[in-house]
Image (tube, rainbow, N blue to C red):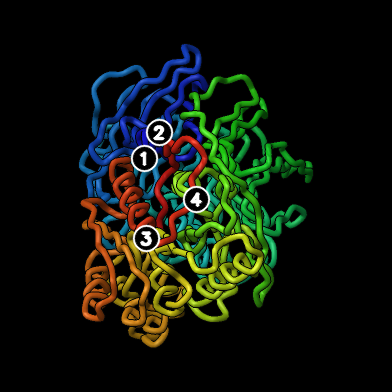
Amino acid sequence: MTSPYQVFVAALPDVCPADPHRMVFTADAGGRCEVFTWDARARRARQVTDSPAGTAHRAIDADGYVWWFEEDATERGRWWFRHFDGGPRLPGLPGAPAGRPSGLAVTAGGTVAAAVATGRRTAVLMGRRGRAPREVLSTTGPCRLGGVTPDGTLIALASSAEDAAAVTVVEPGGRVVTALPGPALPGPALPGPAIPVPAMAGPVTPGPGRPGARLWCQGFSPRAGHRELLLVRDLGDRYALATWTPAGGLRTHQWFTCDTEISARWYPDTREVLVRQDRHGRSLLHRVDLDGRRHAVVPTPPGSVLDAAPRDDGAVDYLWTDTAHPPVPHATDGIALPPPGPSVVVPGRHTDVWTPVGEGRVHTLLSLPEPAGRTTPPPAVFLIHGGPADHDRDAYDATVHSLVASGYAVVRVNYRGSTGYGPGWRRAFPAGVGHTQVEDLAAVRADLVSRGLVAGDASALWGVSWGAYLVLLALGTHPGLWRAGVAVKPVADWVAAHRSTTPALRALDVRLFGGTPDEVPERYARSSPLSCATAVTAPLLVVGAAHDTKCPPGQIRTYLAALAAADVPHEAMWLDTGHDGYDGATHVAVLRRSLRFLRDRLPEPAPSAPGRPPAPAGGPRSR
């Protein structure tokens, strides 16, 4: 590693509604993710934030004020703002409670709406920039802000897509207008997960799911005078767009459907919608005309579109990447977007492998190092994605780059439960939570070994969050298959994690297991790595975070104590951070420690291609 690890949020800049040449974005600043402004006319960037822990959440309003959420190591904080052209930094919502950000919206008229998660409740706030807000309502369960109408008269709140009230529309006074897809609610209790998501984030319902009843909020139309809410609906075997208005209610547009997960975003001045489809590890963009009942594919290169936004003239900006190339912004209307990061290319050969399993075929993204005189298959590192409601994309990943350049094959498996392969694949948990995914990892390993693509005696596992959980479970249930494991911020003890994690993740656990640990204790025990810790034989590196609220440190310490009592070879590394991190130094420390750990336990890889990689990266992986 000869150059800094770069950390930033892989998303397009936010554009000032009144001046498209003024933008705000996140980029690397000396190894931390920070907020910058971009003046497209002058082609000039200016750094706005400088936080010890980094800054990820940002926005810009119609008056040209830049907003950001400043949080501490415990991932709690408040909103701040300053003008695009500079000036003092000021509290955005003075007096608002400190917490975790669950969404921010500022209307053209200056009305500010925000949701802040504090402990077991989420406060929904409204006010004016720089003034003390009023609390619209407080939910008993977590939710996120799904949008505000341009006139500020309706607020959309999104909970879990599984809930009877997946999306609730309220007035600024707190009165519930409707709950979708069910009937109107008598009050403001809103159970479900509070997970801030990007504007083009896809359906993120965890677990097997309830077919035919799930709904995802995509935001209100930005057109002045309109109060139309855009949604994505699960039809059981496909996904469709839906809209809601106060006068017309909920309407599903079944004439346009997709077989895999989609997200959507309004075009600014029409009833057209830009749809991003995640399909088999890659992306498609569609332009959909709701009035004309027409749709067309928006051409993009093969790979992944991490974010996309339509402009007033119909052009589309999008952030593109593939496994070999870091994200690059594309603008089709001539507006100059901020320049991309370093121009690097991941060495090796990148290909796809499909492996038969009970419900179909598991898709794997395989990256093989340059042969460099090798006569035998390379050692392999299975890099396991988190979620479980996520998937590995044909997209740049700094860890993949580092491993391939070091001579390892990298195996990214989109196991059952992953997004991007349709509702049926999402619901396929026949062997139970964790065990289905571990079965798929073992099946892919056997397939790759039989094809002679990777070494049969040199496979390791590496995962973060839910992916780290699968590392621990795989090592405990299939100890003979794996030579080593790296588990970064894992769930190690399901019961303890459930009792001390965030409300959003407790709700996720209940959906995954069909109840709480008190209601279905045997299911939690069967899927918990702690139950099979004594069976682990492969050396294991476990990384925990002292301020982690998602995968709390206490349950990791319990697991480490079980390994020590059973004399299982292991190492522990502790970070003074929360679950998500925006400081590159921390990521570099974990990356270097993990690479050293694997190099000492796997056969020496063949010499890599000349030149070690820089390691730019998108946002951190999370559960």
Q: Residue at x 33, y 42 (%)?
A: 582
| Rendered-image quadrant of the C terminus | bottom left
The alpha-carbon separation of the residues under discs 2 and 3 comes to: 26 Å
Residue 337 location, x and y as percent?
A: 52, 24
The kind of residue on which mark 3 rests is Pro
**Label 1 Cα neighbours within 10 Å, binned few <14 / some 14-19 / many ≥20:** many
Inspect this view and state whether residue 181 appears: no
Residue 485: tell me if it is visible.
yes
Q: Amino acid at mark 1?
A: Ala
User: Which amino acid, mark 4?
Assistant: Ala
Give the x, y percent position of residue 549.
28, 60
Q: Where does label 2 land, which residue?
A: 26
- Between the C-alphas of marks 3 and 4, the distance is 50 Å
Mark 3 residue crowding within 10 angstroms, few (<14) / some (14–19) / many (20+): many
Q: In the picture provided, is 5 more to the left or to the right than 480?
A: left
Q: For the residue marked with disc 2, what is the amino acid?
A: Thr
